[in-house]
Amino acid sequence: MDNSGIYIHVPFCIRKCLYCGFFSVPLNNELMSKYCSALKKELQFRADSAQGYTFTSLYLGGGTPSLLPFKELTNIINLCMNLYHFDNQAEITIEANPSSLSDMKIQQLAELPINRISLGIQSCDDNILKAIGRPHCTHDSYHIYEQLRKTGFKNISIDAIFALPGQTMNQWKDSLQKILSLRPEHISLYCFTYDPGSEMYHRYKKGELPEPDELKESEMYKIAIETVRNGGYIHYEISNFALQGLESRHNMIYWKNKPYWGFGPSAFSFVDGYRFSAPASIMEYIKKCDANIDELYHDREKLEEERSLHETAALNMRLLKEGIYIPELENRYPGLSPYQILRDALGILLEEEMIQKIDNQRFCLTDKGILFADYVSSQLI
Amino acid sequence: MTEPRNNIRNFSIIAHIDHGKSTLADRLLLFTKTISDRDFRDQVLDDMDLERERGITIKARAVRLTHQHTDGQEYILNLIDTPGHVDFSYEVSRSLAACEGALLIVDASQGVEAQTVANVLLAFEHNLEIIPVINKIDLPAAQVPEVKRQIEDVIGIPADEAILVSAKTGLGVEEVINALVNKIPPPRKFGDDNRLRALIFDSVYDMYRGVIVYIRVFSGTVHKGMMIRMMKRDTVFEVLEVGVFRPKGMPVKQLAAGEVGYVIANIKQPQDISIGDTITDNKMRAATSLPGFKILQPMVFCGMYPVDTNDYELLKDALEKLQLNDSAFHFEPETSIALGFGFRCGFLGLLHMEIIQERLGREYDIDMVATAPSVIYKVHLSSGVVEDIDNPVNFPDTSGIDFIEEPFIKATIICPNECIGGVMQLARDRRGECKQTETIDSKRVMITFEMPLAEVVIDFYDKLKSITRGYASMDYELIGYRESSVVKVDMLVNGDIVDAFSFIVHKDKAYNRGRFVAERLSTVIPRQLFQIAIQAAIGGKVIARETITALKKNVTAKCYGGDITRKRKLWEKQKEGKKRMKQIGKVQIPQNAFLTVLKMDE
């Protein structure tokens, strides 16, 4: 049976960052406790169907999962460990933003089986942090990072955003240098977009914020790739860089198109060939978990074999080193002829120098192709 | 025995749009009890919804009124309704040819308008007795003496006996009836051989009975069972029924000289007859037909394409059905590289086109795309051959062209004095030449222009209306073809000509137009992996150029969590978008680029 991952969505934030389009609600203790008991019900509800799966990762994302009271966090992680079969090397990540952690909280996290922290520092410029509504400053970032190290966390990932409205190239280069000097094991770099549902999208639609600047985006992206690669990191996925062997195992599951189990409101699952998600409403989620949990998931979508193949190819291509490996696809889709099906698209992409062929069976993005990865994937889908 | 009867009066009502023609017709029907109050609904004669809504008459109608006159005799008054718009001037002319007189209605508050003048001129051509009627005198803004002066000065007919009417309240309607009997002459006689001659002035299609032909008999009689011959079309049909309109069809034994009515003769399609043709007895044929026949030629053309290619058959069906009641409307299949399968449609004029387009949407619920209207250019080749070109795609190679002619019109515009400057400027922009300026009253002038039809078919009315805040009226007539320096401009995308983007334009305007289209294209064609050159060219000579820079990136470095479905949808959308685009050379061109250019509004 395939290795899989579990994702738990904790939809609470002190306040929502201005660029964020993910589902979250303001922190509210009463709602938090109802959410926790609903989440436990959901974990229990699906436990039987997970028999036979081995989980290699658990990822607590959000929202701000570090806002969970220590007791609840402990209960939830323990419940997962008891109900689901985890590999003993499993990667267990919690997302945190610097303002949601304190020295005491860090000590508490260290008592749990959590072995990876994803720290959303986003920028190393206080003016930018203020402009995008982050609740922390750069000083908090460095302090928290140091505390995490001191406490013994050996796998820390840092998130940062580029091409924000008003951000200059020099500010971005400076942030990159500061991040590199921290020497995290993993770095995720995201290009800013106006996400529907975010405050900045709203302001952009009202004409208060500038149009996206494609040239700036591509220049900042190119600089980032170059700088982080030169810092000794492997650029293993469009947005992700890691020191050798420290790629995020949880994220790899997405790009490999392997099964994953999502829990909590708005979380997506891909199990036994079906994709589905719980409603992106905290009230509805709680209500359904309490009363009729069988009706929790909507959008149930079965992926047919050939469609799944196209999707796997499109996703695999985002992995810069591994790309599409034909024998692997043949193993996974024994009823289909993956090469025949993808040949025309691959041919065009080779001709356009978007991809390159490695040892005759493997197709990977070229440096040019990295900048057009969505186009490449759209050709493969 | 077939002498026209002296107690018949055949008449039309001529008026500018909205001056109250249909309302007065309704009053006449009510007054003569042709319809009862119970059956009455506003504007009985306009039986299409569209007509009632727009308040204009699209198809001519005829109705027979009977009136007990003060002299003790009963009179038959045949009202032949005419369409009110210039596009249907031939139909108007045939309707007038069926009459001996006309009521000229002028709105007491608006005064003489452009169509009033145009229709009176037509009536003069047919030597009709014209009875001026000033309508809407109940309005506070009515200016009866001023309107009388305009009728005398602008139209040139005496107006002291003009009848003052309010069709709305019924005031003056009896006077109108009396004037019809007393002033309009009884039916004219034609020829002296007593053989059947009947003028076809209209037709409608009935699903069960085929074509119903509207006729005015000038000599002889027509009755059931008779074999009739269409003299110009040279076809023969058996008469199944003759009748009169009261206002619904009522069969009668026969129609004799002077009478107006209908013939049903097992005619399957409207295309089998022609308006203006003469019907005669197949056995006892008349030697000469009635004058004035001509075959109607469409003047304005456009392509019509279903938005959804699956609707092609539906559109074809709808066009066929529309044609059943409108023999002036033509269409034939055509293909466009850009828009796929569709139809090239020909219309008498702009309003005609608008009405057909609106009916397709309204009655048949079809989403369709209409291309920019075009006229027919006569291209004289060096070989002596003349080609009629109504579609730039078919424009011949420049090297083989001797010279080109395009249709010109005489446009008559009546507008407020303060708008003269704006109207003159608009006409000059459209290559118009001012021929005459005439004062109508202290506030309005009548300006006559000669200008190319091509310059009027695209948004001229809209511009005129906006310049004059709706106060201008306009009428036009074709005055023939004139030599003109028009050129075909091609649009090239990365060196390839895209036929659907080509257009025909006067050479003085080619540069601006070419630059405009190139600019438009450069904004609607999405950037691609390489740089794209958009060029406008005449023959081989490039007159404008725009560049679409290459795409810098197409990647979102972003966190999607587990929402692969959303990511996939983005990719699928990109892929779908690409599929729906037309590939010209290496370049992908979206559908809306074709529309943007074809629409032409600047």
Image (tube, rainbow, N blue to C red):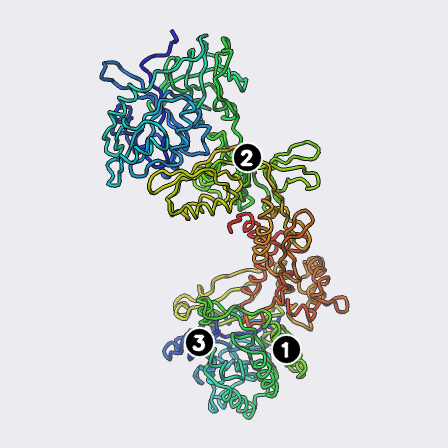
* Horizontal side, residue B230 vs residue A354: left or right: left
Residue at mark 1: A223
- Mark 1 vs mark 3: which is more N-terminal? 3
Query: Which numbered dot is residue A16?
Result: 3
Kind of residue at disc 1: Ile
> Which is nearer the eye, B399 or B254?
B399
Q: Chain of mark 3?
A: A
Quarter of the view holding residue B37: top left
Give x and y (percent) for residue B600. Answer: 53, 49
Give x and y (percent) for residue A94. Answer: 52, 81
Query: Which numbered dot is residue A235?
Result: none
Q: Chain of mark 1?
A: A
* Residue drawn at point x = 37 percent, y = 31 percent: B155
Residue lying farthest right? A359
Pointer 1 local density, CA inside 10 Å: few below 14, some 14–19, many at least 20: some
> Which is nearer the eye, B203 or A328?
B203
Residue lying farthest top? B1
Give x and y (percent) for residue B33. Answer: 26, 24
